[in-house]
Amino acid sequence: MNRIVMKTRVSRDGMLHLSVPVGLAEADHEVQVTVESVAPRQSMSSAEWSAWIDSMAGSWHGDFERPPQGEFEEREPLT
């Protein structure tokens, strides 16, 4: 069975309701469910975003290279 990651919310009554489609091939198999809280994302202000962008300047150390693109396919005209 493949690992399935789902994000959902706990309802106001504190209950978590899951409905996970895993397919008929997985019927009658034992599964394990792990519940983890997801840390809320903190949004950045415009000034914080600009400071982060500025901190990235000059951070690339390496060469830029374009690998070979291969041969162009010849096709028959459409007309």
Image: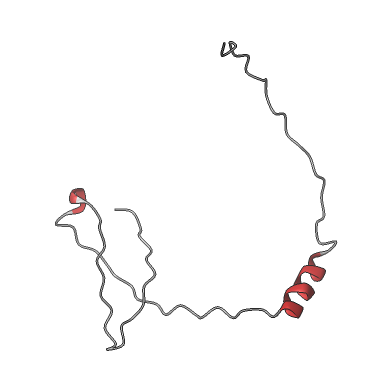
**Residue occupying the far right of the picture:** 58
Image location (x, y in percent) of residue 74 = 63, 14
Figure quadrant of residue 61: bottom right
Q: Looking at the picture, does residue 14 appear above or below residue 30?
A: below
Q: Looking at the picture, does residue 6 appear above or below residue 17?
A: above
**Residue occupying the far bottom of the picture:** 13
Image location (x, y in percent) of residue 45 = 69, 80
Q: Is residue 52 left or right of residue 39?
A: right
The residue positioned 39% from the left and 77% from the top of the image is 36
Q: Looking at the picture, does residue 3 appear above or below residue 64?
A: below
Between 18 and 37, the one nearer to me in the picture: 18
**Residue occupying the far left of the picture:** 28
Image location (x, y in percent) of residue 40 = 51, 80
Q: Is residue 34 left or right of residue 66?
A: left
Q: Is residue 52 left or right of residue 35?
A: right
The residue positioned 82% from the left and 69% from the top of the image is 54
Image location (x, y in percent) of residue 71 = 67, 20
Q: Is residue 70 left or right of residue 9?
A: right
Figure quadrant of residue 34: bottom left
The quarter of the rendered structure image containing the C terminus is top right
Q: Looking at the picture, does residue 31 appear above or below residue 75?
A: below
Figure quadrant of residue 12: bottom left
